[in-house]
Amino acid sequence: MIRHRGLALSAAAAFTFLGLAALAHEFKLDSVITSFVKLDPGQAHLVVRLPLHLTRTIKIPVKGVWIDLDTSGPALEKLLAGLGHDITLFEDGRALSPRSAVGRFSLPSDRSFREYETAVEHVARPPEPDTQIFIDQGYFDAHLTYAIRSASSRFAIQTQVAPELKDYLKMTIRYLPPGEEGQAMMITSESGRVSLNPEWYRAGASFVVLGIKHILTGYDHLLFLLCLVIPFLRLREVAAIITAFTVAHSFTLLGSAYGLGPGGDWFPPFVETAIAASIVWMALENIAGVDLRRRWLITGLFGLVHGFGFSYGLKENLMFAGHHLVVALLSFNVGIEIGQIAVLAVMLPVLALLRKSVLKGRVGVIILSALVAHTGWHWMVDRAAIFWKTPWPQFDGRALMTLARWVAGLLIAFGLVRWLGRRAAEVLARRAAATGRPS
């Protein structure tokens, strides 16, 4: 039991150890804390494995270069108190305090944390009398138990272990609710409070926000949108193009999220290079003065590539969707479209003002497109250098089957894009004719 609040507070202060540790010692980057969260009737369990090199400001007794396990009890108490302070479980928004905690030191060769049951059994056993654990090597393992009102409550978790390390210190969580399949996620101190079992509407809202943030911080996607609309001054001319882009990137975004996209280390750098190339192509097309009435077709092609780029931002966060995968997918796409509309709402009037005052006619299109092409070219060269260093895929039967599925899907997508583009243009043309104003 954790009985002494004074000890807990002093240990909590000591457990913010890593800022000093990073300055005084060489720190291992990309460290990982492994954990399980299991719910039982009336109680929740948090089982944690912390690499020992994270605990350097807690004085652990040693004999030479080995941890003195016989006299390590006080150090374990301090570590447990600090851990209970810096990793917080929440039930329906209420922070929980551990009602009991046990811990031990473990060898770096120990593999008990592959499963929850073996981890719990391992923490409950003291080390063998002749165990020798080298200083700063191995693990500190802990099992914290919390009293809860109901296993069906809404639970969340937050880590504040060494927040100054930001994303370098990761915490993997295996969430094990009763009667359900477990789910895995990875968080850092920058993740804030993370819901372990969100309601569908909370998951949807968070993924809408995530989609908006993704498009607003995706500078290559924004530059591509700018390139699309540089030659145009009327909404009617832009509508079919933006529709093609939206349908195309939605198609590959959803397909890739369901694991239907190409795999392998080569594909992400290929996508990033292709996105930069799409910017250069569109900019050069603006400069050359290609027939802009057919732009929707090439826009749809590049929109497929951008959809894969969007999917990487989605995949990194799908673990936070709980059991609401479809809601998360659709909400993320809605967020992207909201962000895209917001960008265009600002971009189109500014471009119209520039095109009518400072950068008139074809000269304005050429100057703006040349600036965009210059930026896109540098991105493309830098990304291509990474892509060429990546091993190429082997075209076996599975790869050919994936390719065939995507070809068939692309044909369907292009048919849909073409139909929607024409419909959008017709609707806007009718509205313009009815009001007597250009659209």
Image (cartoon, rainbow, N blue to C red):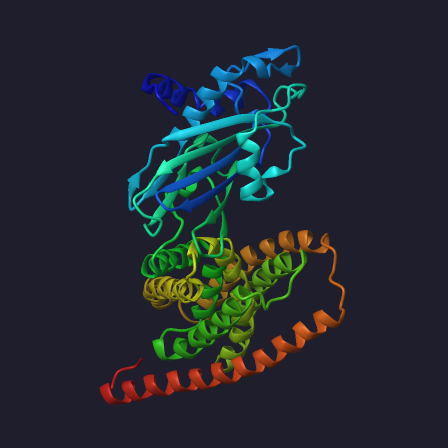
Q: Which residue is most to the left?
A: 435
Is residue 209 shown left or right of residue 415?
A: left
Front-most of 207 and 286? 207
281 horizontally vs 41: left or right: right
Residue 28, quarter of the rendered image: top right
- Looking at the rendered structure, the number of numbered marks drawn on it comes to 0
Q: Measured along the vertical axis of the image, is residue 408 above or below residue 314?
A: below
Residue 301 percent location from the top left of the image: 56, 74
Residue 407: % across, % down: 63, 78
> Residue at position x 36%, y 31% from top?
99
At horizontal 33% and vertical 57% (from top left) the residue drawn is 202
Residue 267 location (% of width, % of height): 64, 60
- Where is the N terminus found, in terms of image quarters? top left
Please indicate, yes or no, whether residue 33 appears anywhere in the rendered image.
no
Is residue 319 visible from the viewing direction of this image? Answer: yes
For the residue pair 361 and 288, the one nearer the viewer reads as 288
Whether 129 is drawn above or below 219: the answer is: above
**Could you say which is closer to the camera, residue 417 or residue 61?**
61
Q: Quadrant of residue 438?
A: bottom left
Viewer-proximal residue, 65 or 167? 65
Q: Dividing the image into 4 quarters, which one contains the C terminus?
A: bottom left
Query: Residue at horizontal 64%, vertical 37%?
Result: 111
Image coords of residue 50 (percent x, y): 53, 31
Residue at 45% in and 86% down? 419
